[in-house]
Image (tube, rainbow, N blue to C red):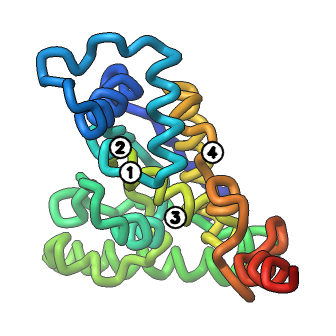
Amino acid sequence: MIERRIILNVILLTHTPEPEKIIAAAAKLCYSQKADIQSLMDGLEPDTVKTFISKLMSMHHESPLEHVSFTFAVEDVSRALLAQITRHRLASFSVRSQRYCSEETFKAVIPDSIDKDPKKRVIFRDAIVDAKNAYNGLQRLGVKNEDARAVLPNACCTRMVFTMNLRELLHFFNLRCCVRAQTEIRELANQMLILCKEVSPILFEHAGAHCESLGYCPEGKMSCGRAPTIEKLLSVYRSK
């Protein structure tokens, strides 16, 4: 039975210590003729670090960001979300195995568009019950988890630990905080961003959907209208 909409849970397990300083040190090595590896951290006071980071962001020199990483643990998200988030190839994932863990009592994530409509909710609930019955029936007949899982739905809950470097994480926020992202992964991205801003307001000052970091929307005709599209800006520029 589907009694309630499952709420995902995400925690920030760990991150690179003093991430701003690490990025500033890497940038310092790139641009300072006299900087040697023994003195990279020298003179990196808060104001200096902030200046380095602002300059990097404005120049789109993002390779120093890759020296910083964040590791999250997430539970009560769907396998559909798993399929989406693993498309971010520069992340590392450890996911609860459906081969070694039985799903006989699995929970299901119900999308908002189905949950708010009683008739759709009944159809969804019946499909989940049928999937559970099929899975458990196959298990009783001696079918191993790795094969019985073939009948499980995308709504099936999972949990995972994953790590992203800062450059990839900001790209993740660009795509997944956008209103065009599916609701579930957008909720995850927004919660992750809140956690990241608590660690470093400087690094994540302009993080979020593309319109937050760029000031315009790159989605063209699929734009939500919150920010002007690049086409609109170019049109205004060319008309001058």
What residue is pinned by disc 4? 206
* Residue 127 position in % (x across, y down): 55, 82
Task: Say the numbered circle drawn on residue 62.
Answer: 1
Q: Would you call the spot at circle 3 few (<14 residues within 10 Å), some (14-19), or many (20 or more)?
A: many
What amino acid does circle 2 point to? Leu
Residue on which disc 3 sits: 108
Tag 4, which secondary structure? loop
The answer to whether residue 161 is seen in the rendering is no
**Mark linked to residue 65:** 2
Query: Real-space Cα distance between discs 4 and 1?
Result: 14 Å
**Are the residues tagged 4 and 1 within 8 Å (C-beta)?**
no
Residue contact between numbered discs 1 and 2, judged by CB atoms under 8 Å: yes
Q: Nearer the viewer, residue 42 or 22?
A: 42
Q: Residues within 10 Å of mark 2 (few under 14, many from 20)?
A: many
* Label 4 crowd bin: few (<14), some (14–19), many (20+), radius 10 Å: some
Q: Which of pointers 3 and 2 indicates the residue nearer the eye?
A: 2
The 10 Å Cα crowd at callout 1, few under 14, some 14 to 19, many 20 or more, is: some
Which tag is nearer the camera, tag 4 or tag 1?
1
Of label 2 and label 4, which has the lower sequence position?
2
Query: Residue at coordinates 52% horizontally, 17% vertically from top-left?
Result: 47
In the image, what residue type sits under mark 3? Ala
The amino acid at mark 4 is His
SS category of the residue bearing label 1: loop
Q: Position of residue 180 (x, y in %)?
A: 67, 73
Residue found at x 12% / y 16% = 38
Q: Cα distance, mark 1 to mark 3?
A: 38 Å
